[in-house]
Image (spheres, rainbow, N blue to C red):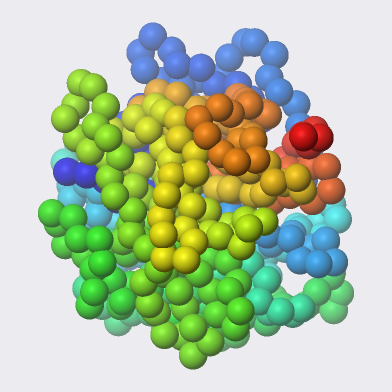
Amino acid sequence: MATRSIGAAAGVITCLGVVVAPAVAMPTEAATGAVTASSAPAPTYPVIASGLDNPRQLAFAANGDLYVAESGHGGNGPCIPGGDDPTVSTCFGTSGAITLIHGKRARQVITGLPSLAAQVATSGGQLPPGAQAAGPSDVTMAGRSTIAFTVGFGSDPVNRFAFSAASSAGHLLGTVGTSRVSPGWAPFRRSGIDGVQQRADIAAFEAVNNPAPPVDAPDSNPNALIPDGDGFVVADAGGNDLLRVSASGQVSLIATFPPAKACPPLPIEPQAVPTSVVRGPDHAYYVSELTGFPFCEGSARIWKVKDGQTSVYASGLTNVTDLAFGPRGELYAVEIAQNGLQSGPVGAVVKIPRGGGDQHEVVAAGLFAPYGIALRGSSAYVTTGSILPTTAGGGQVVRIPLKHSTH
């Protein structure tokens, strides 16, 4: 069955038997197929924040504050069969959060957000808490003191009823939420879900419309968003589509994305699994792909969507999770697994020249499960340790220096 949700990436890590290494270490594929820390020199990048719980995408405010979406590690339930593996119980909790990084300090500013993660395998034994986590996945500014964020889901929208009945946070799964925040470090007041407003129900739109129907049931996993006038544009990794949210919260379709080509030896066409959306210098939308199982190396594309037309802007990429445009039109992409997720979560940041194509320059390699990217000045800020099956908080934000192209 084709894999549609981002949580599947963590599932691959679990299957490989990952030995968790520091986010800036260089893991290698051992003879057994496990990922372990290499004795080779590791890339050393300044750590901006640590102790994060499955950090995903991130965004800067105008004053330099950096907000990070933490997907959390699920909780004690209720539980449902996993969307990617029905033998695994996916359990609900409120461990999702939005974290503010201000200078050298980091603090959760919104807590109690919903999180789903595998906890127990009904066949095959126990999974570590936090595997296959889905929860807050992207964050953006929606005004000077308001942020907007996506809350992932990765399942048939009908499955939300069990969670919304058990917790007031459950209704936020598969939605876009907004909340007011205090710019800077003081005055500071941490906010729970009482301060969160549901801006749009992406999962409900998928349940009714299912614009890119696969062979299975509707599936929604809103993974990324950007401001768009008084509303937003959202990439739904489960629905394989790009959506517009109006000022009033109405959801409409912009584009759908077809499967990628099958890669030998499996005759499976991986689903697109759109993970990120950014606006380019030409005001078009650019959308990245994780691609679904079998997570083929080199099969991910970046789509350009403009004036109702969809075309491939860049190709030959692998398991892309986020994008950011540089000052001269170059496009930076995060590959969560440079050689494909079945080889382990050893990722990279690559640069695609202005105009796109299939030629890319590796900017930083050997990153442990990188996911989100945000640019400021001459540096890229990247989340690592983003899909760890742990409650310990092994995620980080690292700063990577960039040399922007002069042509």
Place residue 57 in its image quadrant: bottom right
Residue 402 position in % (x across, y down): 78, 35
Query: Taking 348 as reference, is 243 above or below it?
Result: below
What residue appears at the point 55 percent right and 44 percent down from the top-left corner? Answer: 371
Residue 130 appears left or right of 332 = left
Label tally? 0
Residue 46 appears left or right of 344 = right
Residue 368 position in % (x across, y down): 57, 32
Residue 87 appears left or right of 362 = left
Residue 87 position in % (x across, y down): 18, 47
What residue appears at the point 47 percent right and 66 percent down from the top-left corner? Answer: 307
Query: Taking 333 as reference, is 96 above or below it?
Result: below
What residue appears at the point 83 percent right and 42 percent down from the top-left corner? Answer: 378
Who is closer to the viewer here, 307 or 297? 307
Who is closer to the viewer here, 352 or 357? 357
Who is closer to the viewer here, 126 or 215? 215
Q: Pick out the residue farthest to the bottom.
A: 248
Residue 322 can be seen, yes or no = yes
Residue 170 can be seen, yes or no = no
Place residue 98 in its image quadrant: bottom right
Place residue 74 in its image quadrant: bottom left
Q: Considering the image in quadrants, where does the N terminus appear?
A: top left
What residue appears at the point 49 percent right and 61 percent down from the top-left corner? Answer: 306
Q: Considering the image in quadrants, where does the C terminus appear?
A: top right
Residue 117 position in % (x across, y down): 37, 54
